[in-house]
Amino acid sequence: MRWRPKNCLCVIDIQGPGFDLGSFAAKCASHSELTDQQAWDAIFASSTSECQRESRIRNYLETTEGLNPSTYSLDTVWSGTGASRDLNIAVRGVTFNAGSRTALQTFCNTTFGTGLITVTA
């Protein structure tokens, strides 16, 4: 059986009745220059942290900006390769004024580290 992570185009063979992770059937362009271990680490760190980031950003939008969860969506796109990958987020369904967009970018920089998340809309 094969598995593909949500955040990249790698293809990983799954083995045995316990669904143990096997080997890479293919690595995406973002992970192609990494060793298998580095690619595993990046994929699992990104998957876990992507969920945590999205949850914290949604909490910020709903508590600080007062957005109703049913009125917006978050679009996420990864860019870059290897260890220098960056997550770009866009908030859809609402129009931010410049101050709100800047405040969201500042929140992301303070919470997750400067330059790791770029607010594109």
Image (spheres, grey):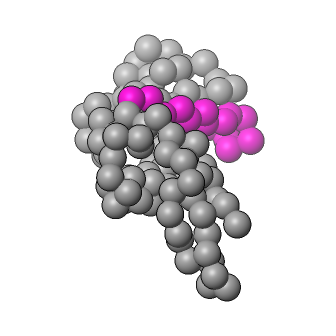
State whether residue 52 appears in this view.
no
Quarter occupied by residue 115: top left
Residue placed most toward the observer, 59 or 46: 46
Name the side, left or right, on which 18 lies relative to 47.
right
| Vertical order, 47 against 73 (above or below) | below
Q: Which residue is rendered at x = 33% and y = 46% of the image? A: 34
Q: Which residue is rendered at x = 55% and y = 27% of the image? A: 90
Numbered marks: total: 0
Q: Position of residue 50 (x, y in %)?
A: 48, 50
Q: Name the residue furthest right.
A: 70
Name the side, left or right, on which 71 lies relative to 26.
right
Q: Name the residue furthest top.
A: 98
Residue placed most toward the observer, 5 or 11: 11
Q: Which residues are magenta?
A: 65-80
Q: Name the residue furthest bottom.
A: 17
Name the side, left or right, on which 25 lies relative to 69.
left
Membership of 73 in magenta stretch: yes
Residue placed most toward the observer, 61 or 112: 112
Q: Position of residue 112 (x, y in %)?
A: 31, 45
Quarter occupied by residue 43: bottom left
Q: Position of residue 20 (x, y in %)?
A: 56, 77
Q: Which residue is rendered at x = 32% and y = 52% of the image? A: 35
Q: Which residue is rendered at x = 67% and y = 61% of the image? A: 2
Quarter occupied by residue 87: top left
Q: Quadrant of the N terminus?
A: bottom right
State whether residue 50 appears in this view.
yes
Membership of 117 in magenta stretch: no
